[in-house]
Amino acid sequence: MEAFTEHVGRVVPLDRINVDTDQIIPKQFLKRIERTGFGEFLFNDWRYLENGEPNPEFVLNFPRYADASILIAGANFGCGSSREHAPWALQQYGFKAILAPSFADIFRNNCYKNGILPIALPADVIASLSQTAHDTEGYQLMIDLEEQSVICPDGTAHAFEIGDFEKYCLLNGLDEIGWTLQFEADIAAYENQSRL
Amino acid sequence: MKKTMYEKIWEAHLVRASADEVPILYIDTHLVHEVTSPQAFEGLRLNNRKVRRPDLTFATMDHNVPTTDRSLPITDLIAAKQMETLAENCAEFDIPLYDIDSPEQGIVHVIGPELGITLPGKTIVCGDSHTSTHGALGALAFGIGTSEIEHVLATQCLLQQKSETFEIRIDGTLPYGVTAKDIILAIIGHIGIDGGNGAVVEYTGSAIRALSIEERMTVCNMSIEAGARAGMIAPDETTYEYIAGRRFAPKDEEFDAAVEHWKQLPTDEGATYDRTLLLDAADIAPQVTWGTNPGMVTDVTGRVPDPADMTTADEKTATEHALAYMDLQPGTPMTEIAVDRVFIGSCTNSRISDLRAAAEVAKGRKVADTVSAMVVPGSQAVKRQAEAEGLDEIFRAAGFEWREAGCSMCLGMNPDTLSPGQRCASTSNRNFEGRQGKGGRTHLVSPQMAAATAVTGHFVDIRKFQ
């Protein structure tokens, strides 16, 4: 997994609550057997018109957000299906971090496994950042994982919570399977004791 | 110390729990299907890793499979490739597979309990959010992503943080015409689709105790639609009776010993939950969703809400989006909404009791001329049982299509999809935009309500249906 330490990037606001993973990557794109090739289908049904042209009314298609790498969204982002194709699509599109008042559990776990940082901030902070992103062309944020801080261009910093282990994995790009396998003796002992 | 059932199962499965490390939880059963597993197996190969316990792993094909004549070739070549890949992976890693030609094939959350793989006290995972279904038998069961599938394949463990506990107690007697589906839709309507985030829900109370195991599965199945990590119901005599004699269940003395163990699982009297919600079964009416998530739901006697009545700006915007997508006007009575399609199936409502309930409504009646309706059994075993009881004949005579087992139009990964603008009464679990087909409009209901809607052509209060 790619490590995440610091990131500076342009912000795109998606003013919707309860964005489900069916919207992030619709089911017709889940038939691939590879981990790649999902970025172009991110938000497919919102992003493209019936004729396949980009939908000019969808925020990701606004030229001013063309190279955005930080997504700001409403509460409960990533609800629904457990499909990891959702964080794959977000990452392959170019997103490094997602800011929202809250996230669905499975989606948040899936993000950590793919080097994407899901950052939960209070709803009023998200609303304010989103408004600023609407009002300010080229608006950028800096994210410092070590400091657990989102830093605005004017120097205002918003602290966020993350589990110690998730933070350690992201900072180091850790292979979690390798981590668990170092405790193989504990697993074997558990199996013997439980006669599994 | 008094413990909840979740805490008991959690503690019994801790392989390692140091204060400064994320806990390592042992997984008793890993269920695998074709859509979320290929990249996990590929990850194993790239890192030269094996499947630690193929004997604790079971695979089937359900999401992509056609529900039409199985003797014909699969026309969707990309889907066929995904199924072939699962077969190759199972052969390479020695994992038992119930493939498309198997008499045991079916939706993974239908065949697990059916085969006696799902048992009380087990930890069960699958790369599918509706794994919460298995909690109906007193297991701790939850959905995981593909990276976690690879982790379980390689280690038979997961790195997991403990969840909060959330008791949802429903006492009283369900009124006539109100089903397990209405219980869970009413709960989601009450707490919202993020009301269970971060928690494992335990459903308790006399109304839950009175449910059959299949009905309990319907309730636990949709726990994830409230955002819960898992849903579970303590095992009791109903549970033991359901399990006895199933293929992979313990037999004879081993079964008796297992029952004694399972009797220790229920939450201790006096144990406390982090959150609690009490509902009265008598207050629950048949439910119909009107919007684009399962929390956008109302009584069948209700009306499409007005965005102006929403309490927050976000909810107002979300309601406006939903009504525009669903092409509904505020204030419209639910019973005046006409449908084009009816889908009876999915891991929520495709078991034999669901089909019996729908058939009872369909018997001697005809699907409305304006409606196209289909019944998709959850497994080949459910299909055989239904056919033995003559349910297929009842459905066919009424004008329903009778299909082969699979996920089908719950998520429309196979050819069973809605066309843009089509409106569907569905017994499935998600009414998200495009879920059943791009531009399709889904309303979630119980099997009885779906069958009655097929007959009348619009939503109908099953309590008054003659």
Image: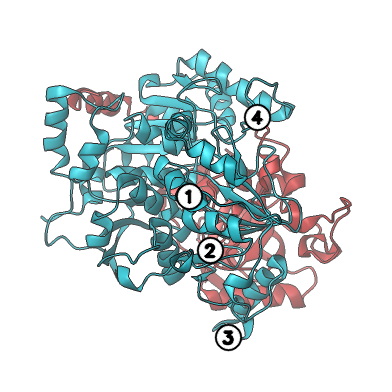
Chain colours: A red, B cyan
Circles 4 and 1 on the same chain:
no
Local packing at callout 1 (Cα closer than 10 Å; few below 14, some 14-19, many 20+) is many
According to the picture, the residue beneath numbered tag 4 turns out to be: A33
Residue B29 placement: quadrant: top left
Q: Nearer the viewer, mark 2 or mark 3?
A: 3
Same chain for marks 2 and 1? no
Distance CA(mark 2)–CA(mark 3): 22 Å
Identify the residue at image location x=59%, y=68%: B290
Distance between the alpha carbons at the discs numbered 2 and 1: 34 Å
Q: Residue at x 66, y 73 (%)?
A: A130
Is disc 3 surrounded by few (<14), some (14 to 19) or many (20+) residues within 10 Å?
Answer: few
- Pick whichever of labels 1 and 3 is earlier in the sequence: 3
Closer to the eye: label 4 or 1: 1
Q: Which residue is identified by label 1?
A: B358
* Residue B190, horizontal then vertical, whole percent: 42, 71
**How far is mark 1 from mark 3, CA to CA?**
35 Å
Q: How far apart are marks 2 and 4 (CA)?
A: 28 Å
Q: Residue at point 66% right, 44% down?
A: A27
Mark closer to the chain start, 2 or 4: 4
Query: Both on one chain, marks 4 and 3?
Result: no
**Subunit bearing disc 1:** B
The answer to whether B228 is drawn above or below residue A196 in the figure is below
Badge nearest the viewer, 2 or 1? 1
Say left or right for A72 vs B205: right
As rendered, which of A72 and B392 lies closer to the eye?
B392
Image mark for residue B309:
3
Using the image, tell me which numbered label, if any, was put on residue A76: 2
| Badge 2 vs badge 3, beta-carbon distance below 8 Å | no
Q: What residue type is labelled 3?
A: Asp
